[in-house]
Amino acid sequence: MDETILVIAGLPGCGKTTYLDQLSKESWRTFDDFKANAYQNSPQFQKSRKYAALQAAIRDNSRCAVADIDFCKPESRAEAQAVLRAEFPSIELGWRFFANDLIACERNIRRRSRASIEADLRKLYEYSAQYTIPEGMVVLPVLWV
């Protein structure tokens, strides 16, 4: 991979965290659930509590991988890309998309047996309906987790 930063989109249960764990073993700095618990519960990329750490990692020339279910939404992807390109114009930005496989994601959510199963399933159905993958992008299969 030649990218400096990877932005990873995928539904709940698709394997984003597992993929980030693999990248971490290859010396990538990883930022999972990037927008979770954002300041003022904002959906804005820059309001992430992890944004300052991401900026510092990029300035340190670290390869970074950022994942969030909100990147399933085209407007969220556009905003993330605009913010990153505005602040780091020469950055090599890449995208990875997990397949929009509702059945496999639901299987994974039920299999991991967290207390949040029902909330995760609601998010899965909500985001699946909005999730489109741009043509020509790298699409990863849903991982068995």
Image (tube, rainbow, N blue to C red):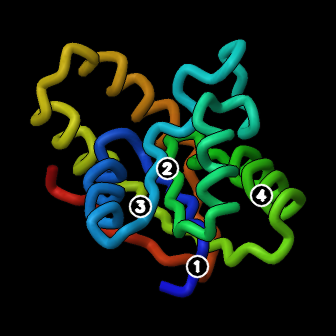
In this view, the mark in front (2 or 3): 2
Label 4 CA crowd tier, 10 Å (few <14, some 14–19, many 20+): some
Locate residue 131 relative to residue 14 in the image: left or right. right
Q: Which mark is residue 98?
A: 3
**Gap in Å between the C-alphas at discs 1 and 3?**
18 Å
Q: Is residue 7 above or below residue 115?
A: below
Locate residue 41 relative to residue 122 in the image: left or right. right
Judged from the image, the secondary structure of the residue bearing numbered disc 3 is strand
**Gap in Å between the C-alphas at discs 2 and 1?**
15 Å
Judged from the image, the secondary structure of the residue bearing numbered disc 2 is strand
Q: Which residue is mark 4?
A: 84
* Amino acid residing under circle 3: Phe
Percent x, y of residue 115 = 20, 14
* Amino acid residing under circle 1: Glu
The residue at 32%/72% (across/down) is: 26
Q: Residue furthest right?
A: 86
Percent x, y of residue 67 = 49, 49
**Gap in Å between the C-alphas at discs 2 and 4?**
14 Å
Instruction: Mark 1 or mark 3: name the one nearer the start of the chain.
Output: 1
Q: Which residue is mark 1?
A: 3
